[in-house]
Image (tube, rainbow, N blue to C red):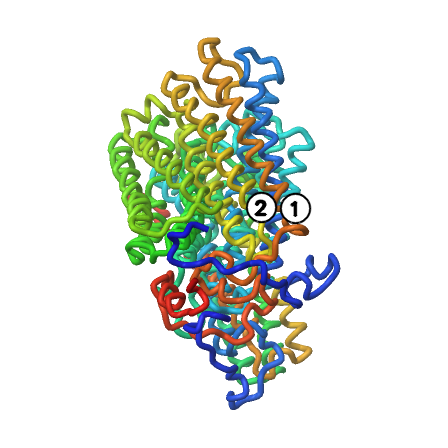
Amino acid sequence: MDNVSVATQPHTHEEHHHVSLPQHRHHFETEEQQREAGTFGMWLFLLTEIMFFGGLFFAYLLYRNWYHDAFVAASNQLSIPLGAANTAVLISSGFFMALGVWAAEVRKKGLLVLFLVITTVLGFIFLGVKYVEYHEKWEKHHIPGAHFDISEFVNPQAYGLKEQPLAPDMAAKTQIFFSLYFAMTGMHALHMIIGIGLLVWLTWRSYRGEFSAGYVAPIEYFGLYWHFVDIVWIFLFPLLYLINRHPGQ
Amino acid sequence: MSAHTIVNLPDQRTATMPKRNYINNEDGILSWLFTGDHKRIAMLYLVSITFFFFIGGAFAGLIRLELLTPQPDLMASDTYNKFFSMHGIVMIFLFLVPSVPAVLGNFLIPIMLGAKDLAFPKINLLSWYLYWIGGLFTLTALVLGGVDTGWTFTTPLSTHYLNTHVVTAAVGIFIIGFSSIFTGLNFIVTIHRMRAPGMTWFRMPLFIWANYAASILMVLGTPVLAISLVLVALERTIGIGVFDPTKGGDPLLFQHLFWFYSHPAVYIMILPGMGVISEVISTFSRKRVFGYTAVAFSSVAIALFGFFVWEHHMFIMGVSNYSALVFSLLTMLVAVPSAIKIFNWAFTLQKGSITFETPMLYAFGFIGLFTVGGLTGVFLGALGMDIHLTETYFIVAHFHFVMVGGMLMAFLAGIHFWWPKMTGRMYSESISKLAAIVTFIGFNMTFLPQFILGYLGMPRRYHAYPPEFQVLNVLSTAGATILGVGYMLPLLYLGWSLKYGAIAGDNPWQATGLEWQIQSPPLTENFTEIPVVDHDAYDYEWLEHKTAQEVTTVG
């Protein structure tokens, strides 16, 4: 150190008035710094997720404008009750996740485990409902690919639907809607599955008491992730299920 | 040393290797594979990207060999397609994108900020493993029979008309993308949260600013590439039709999404290199970088503009004339912050005490070649010129001037500049200067003829060409051979220096950065005490006064 202008200051660890957490990593000067860095990192990660889904949302915007009639007809195939139920399920799971973060902060181990388990169960319910919806599309040949069937959109009366029939070339574009539907909800479901995996792991760690002694960072970061997955759904639900279902009315 | 330098370089004969440093702190291969130390991870990256660089380079050599004659005699056309695709994929995703950030950035950013490590050491290590998993997928695609889409994975070629290992390569790039995202994320958090006391934003070295800007691009751009590759893979495997015109999809949408990442990716590649050049130019002119604030903000401006120019890759693809007009204008605007950098480096040199050490030679190479590459970029941004020149060798020459003449030169400048810090050893100055000059000559011989070839209309990506183009192609291939020698030399003498090089000492260049105030190679924890920074970056005036007062320098 021959550069005198680089003055030094002694470590200030000893001056802290609380016991250092075992999870405090050596390269952070203070726990405050560690916590801020972690939260900031998580938010940045969520930003990359927004960009990831952004590509899909952009494709949706484009094709909805191009093939408006096909998108309207195809979105009428989705079940609002199931979608709404799932929205409720997901919002409640977010609520219990938030309660879980609170329980960790007030160091209540039992409550924390309980809330995480409820969050997990609600996550499974969401995926179950999603399975029912996917299965229905499978039976109706609405899964994009070789078996895709447009007859329901060309001749809705034959299926007991009150839709306007679409010309075959426009009806073929419903496949784009379902491509995007499966890509978007599929990516969302994949995030849910990863989230549930993490939840199980965090529940086990909470059960061992790791997050009930003042160290809550992983619960907090996971909470951010889980809420983000909720918010993606909050955008998907209206875009895919709700908007402009009945043209001309 | 020249007698005219203001600052005398320290006498390295008295320098000793520190007993304890990050290299010998722990022993054994596992201590490297499970390390959390940013300096060790940087070294892991250095070895890895060098490996992939020479794989990519081998493909380049084969391509140039095929183009030696007009006839297709070395390889079949589809083999040629696979070779240039692999050359592009390996060089871009496995070499250029991680080169300066993952090696030099990883090593230096915490030290320059006065921190002990990056914010997330485990994620840093994870990014290296992801890099290798992605790299192995890419190599698998290669071994199984290759990919021939070009590095651009253009639809519907990549989704419908090819029977090669597109999905394997796409998965590889998807994973490498995560590695790049994690590096960028780590840098941003570290720069925001880990700065030493007194290290304000405008006291940070410009290398940090450049990496910060590049990190923003990595974090915001890479996920878009990820989703477009996911959609390509889904289209190939289960046939969803987002890019398939027979189902109503639009292949151009893929191009929009792909270039939304891949144009900013160009700035991911060049910005950290510009950061290196700022450090090197300032050190060897013994002056503060002229217009520090302007250079710092120009990095951010390049990152910002970089997101709004992607359509210039698509001017001939039937996009709206009006949007082409806007994108053409925005493309030319990028030249402004780039020019700010070039002019400011020039003004830094003005009245400086310039010395011509190896890193400086590479930096001069960068400035010249990047200027040519950048200006031809403005040609290509002009709509009329672009329609004439696009998909010709003019494009090839243009981006090789920026990427190879620019970024690779900057990378080598940085490696030579910080090699004493990273290893504690000096390389042989005379042979490294020779390598810098050989590289410069070889580079120009390879790629200058390609500008002419492109202007005359030779299209890119063909393995045969009309005989009248042969002279220039032979020149280019000969140049590539020289260039190859230029790249082999550093491998040899830098490797040699690891064992036999002279001991470098803490500050062989007498530079001002924080990284030069600690021992070389540094301790695992970088600083024994966290520094308090009370001066600006590049404070060579201070250094000058300090030496002026030293009695020992007299006589």
Left or right, B82 with reference to A57: right
Query: In the structure shown, which secondary structural element does the residue marked by tag 2 occupy?
Result: loop
Give how far across and how far down residue A142 sits, in percent: 53, 39
Q: Amino acid at mark 2?
A: Ser
Above or below, comparing residue B247 to residue A205 in the picture: above
Q: Nearer the viewer, mark 1 or mark 2?
A: 2
Q: Chain of mark 1?
A: B
Give how far across and how far down residue B39 sits, in percent: 58, 60
- Whole-number angstrom distance, CA of label 1 to CA of label 2: 9 Å
CB under 8 Å between discs 1 and 2: yes
Q: Which mark is residue B175?
A: none
Outermost residue to the right: B28
Give how far across and how far down residue A112 sits, in percent: 59, 78
Left or right, B541 with reference to A142: left
Q: Mark 2 highlights which residue? A: B428
Query: In the structure shown, which secondary structural element does the residue marked by tag 1 occupy?
Result: helix
Q: Chain of mark 2?
A: B
Are there few (<14), some (14-19), or many (20+) residues within 10 Å of tag 2?
A: some
Judge whether residue A233 can be spotted in this image.
no
Do pointers 1 and 2 mark residues of a single chain? yes
Above or below, comparing residue B378 to residue B118 in the picture: above
Q: Earlier in the sequence, mark 1 or mark 2?
A: 2
Q: Mark 1 highlights which residue? A: B496
Instruction: Please name the residue shown 34% across and 34% down the image.
Output: B377
Above or below, comparing residue B64 to residue A199 in the picture: above
Q: Amino acid at mark 1?
A: Trp
In the image shown, does B489 or A128 lie closer to the viewer?
A: B489
Left or right, A182 with reference to B332: right
In the image shown, does B206 or A179 lie closer to the viewer?
A: B206
In the image shown, does B73 or B165 lie closer to the viewer?
A: B73
